[in-house]
Image (spheres, rainbow, N blue to C red):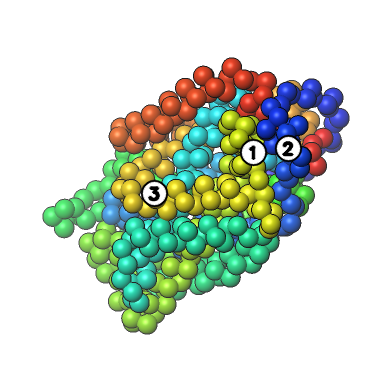
């Protein structure tokens, strides 16, 4: 990997675009443009980003669905997804240091691949950031069951509202809160791994013996097409490493620390998730139990009810932790879209408002409250739309990475990925194929939402190109 910064060049200052009086930073905004505070380093950023990946809650909430469809092929599918994510992480690292904006993917893609492509990435990222938190939050009820029985939808909604309140606090305070919770979820994942390996029922060969329990209880072969289809969810398993890009305006020395945070988070989260998955695959009493995906039940069987309860409570805390970090991340996306004037002036002004603790409080509320409502939507639909959106978003980010070394961007200071342009080209081909193998229903849902967003672009944003959708980079990181 190349971790050297290119020699900075001095660009001529761009012409200032026209602004509406009510826009953030416009004549009607007496406070001037709102800025986020640079208050966290690599450690704090990694803790927040790892908490967004939320390895334990992903292990206990998302992975059981993979076990049900992929059986012993689950570990292999996640391993392949993690390898793909290395190429994705390289793209994020280069683009995130080249365009360090709280807008994340959309700022990077808009700058390098055009404003329409950036707008579509924004819509896809908005789908992901709105859907993922409630998907995770709804798993809380299952892991609070040893203490209290709750309806999953209502429990998930409560977690989302609690996360919203925490998201209104100072980012440094949240880094410490999420750091404590992260330790607990890593302990839970470690306990599962130790117990699984200690009670192994089958050898390492089972990891490539691709079988799943059928509806009649008999072993069925997991086909290559099933694995490819499952890669969309496997990519989602470690998806949270992109949070480092969203936090780039609050990271100290973003030109260097964004890449370090992205790559460190992916490496750590892949280990925390994949090792317990291997242990569960080897330690499950039989194929039917593995396909059933009842990890808590297996933990209790391997140990005792007290250990099972401890693990369940750690997972419940991990889910709350994930909700807090995801709300923080997602509010920054809305904040950045308002600063870049994606909406009518009154909406832009409201979303760009910062509260007492320096957090974008209106954007935080608009992320958390709809997230609570989404807890009452069918879970399979949420999973499917998220998988399609993540895959399509990664594909567009790879396209932007392919264009990242043209013109004046070639000499701007940034972390540069190895094996360019081969890695982005390979990634585009693989992700396009994975996308083609997803269920038509989920493709139609995602495509329909994207089509509506395209109409908004065509009839509102494009005719106002001088005053709308003006993607910006913070002044303190410009050349």
Is residue 88 visible to us here? yes
The residue positioned 52% from the left and 47% from the top of the image is 366
Task: Report the residue marked by disc 1.
Answer: 349
Q: CA distance from mark 1 to mark 3?
A: 26 Å
Q: Callout 3: 10 Å neighbours few (<14), some, many (20+)?
A: many
Instruction: Check contact, mark 2 vs mark 1: CB within 8 A.
Output: yes
Picture residue at 71% right of the left edge, 26% below the top? 19
- Nearest to the observer: residue 123 or residue 365: 365
Q: Left or right of 96: which side holds 220?
A: left
- The answer to whether marks 3 and 2 mark residues whose Cβ atoms lie closer than 8 Å is no
Residue 143 vs 13, above or below: the answer is below
| Residue 381: image location, x then y, percent | 33, 43
Q: Label 3, on which residue?
A: 374
Mark 1 nearby-residue class (10 Å; few <14, some 14–19, many ≥20): many
Between residue 320 and residue 202, name the one nearer to us.
Answer: 320
Which is more N-terminal, label 2 or label 3?
Answer: 2
**Image x and y of residue 257, in percent:** 72, 51
- In the picture as drawn, the residue positioned furthest to the left comes out as 216
Q: Measure the alpha-carbon separation of dots 3 and 2.
A: 34 Å
Q: Locate residue 209: give its quadrant.
A: bottom left
- The answer to whether 104 is drawn above or below residue 354 in the figure is above
- Name the residue tied to disc 2: 29
């Amino acid at each position: 990997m190349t971790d050297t910064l290119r020699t900075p060049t001095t660009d001529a200052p761009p012409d200032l675009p026209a602004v509406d009086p009510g826009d953030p930073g416009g004549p009607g905004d007496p406070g001037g443009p709102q800025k986020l505070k640079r208050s966290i380093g690599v450690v704090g950023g990694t803790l927040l980003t790892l908490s967004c990946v939320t390895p334990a809650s992903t292990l206990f909430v998302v992975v059981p669905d993979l076990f049900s469809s992929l059986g012993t092929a689950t570990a292999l599918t996640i391993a392949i997804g993690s390898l793909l994510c290395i190429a994705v992480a390289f793209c994020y690292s280069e683009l995130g240091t080249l365009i360090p904006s709280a807008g994340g993917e959309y700022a990077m893609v808009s700058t390098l691949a055009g404003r329409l492509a950036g707008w579509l990435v924004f819509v896809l990222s908005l789908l992901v950031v709105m859907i993922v938190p409630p998907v995770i939050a709804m798993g809380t009820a299952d892991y609070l069951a040893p203490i209290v029985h709750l309806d999953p939808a209502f429990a998930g909604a409560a977690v989302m509202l609690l996360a919203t309140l925490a998201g209104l606090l100072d980012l440094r305070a949240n880094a410490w809160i999420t750091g404590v919770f992260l330790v607990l979820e890593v302990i839970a994942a470690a306990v599962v791994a130790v117990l699984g390996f200690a009670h192994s029922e089958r050898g390492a060969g089972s990891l490539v013996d691709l079988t799943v329990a059928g509806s009649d209880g008999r072993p069925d072969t997991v086909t290559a097409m099933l694995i490819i289809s499952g890669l969309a969810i496997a990519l989602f398993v470690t998806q949270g490493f992109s949070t480092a890009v969203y936090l780039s305006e609050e990271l100290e020395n973003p030109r260097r620390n964004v890449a370090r945070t992205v790559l460190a988070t992916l490496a750590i989260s892949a280990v925390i998730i994949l090792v317990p998955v291997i242990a569960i695959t080897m330690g499950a009493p039989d194929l039917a139990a593995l396909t059933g995906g009842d990890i808590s039940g297996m933990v209790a069987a391997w140990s005792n009810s007290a250990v099972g309860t401890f693990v369940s409570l750690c997972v419940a805390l991990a889910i709350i932790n994930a909700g807090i970090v995801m709300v923080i991340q997602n509010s920054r996306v809305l904040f950045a879209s308002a600063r870049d004037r994606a909406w009518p002036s009154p909406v832009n002004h409201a979303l760009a408002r910062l509260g007492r603790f320096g957090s974008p409080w209106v954007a935080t509320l608009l992320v958390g409250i709809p997230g609570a409502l989404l807890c009452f939507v069918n879970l399979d639909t949420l999973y499917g739309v998220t998988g399609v959106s993540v895959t399509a978003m990664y594909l567009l980010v790879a396209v932007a990475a392919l264009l990242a070394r043209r013109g004046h961007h070639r000499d701007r200071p940034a972390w540069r990925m190895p094996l360019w342009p081969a890695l982005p080209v390979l990634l585009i081909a693989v992700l396009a194929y994975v996308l083609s193998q997803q269920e038509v229903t989920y493709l139609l849902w995602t495509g329909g939402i994207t089509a509506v967003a395209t109409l908004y672009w065509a009839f509102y944003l494009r005719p106002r190109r001088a005053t709308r959708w003006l993607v910006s980079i913070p002044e303190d990181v410009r050349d």
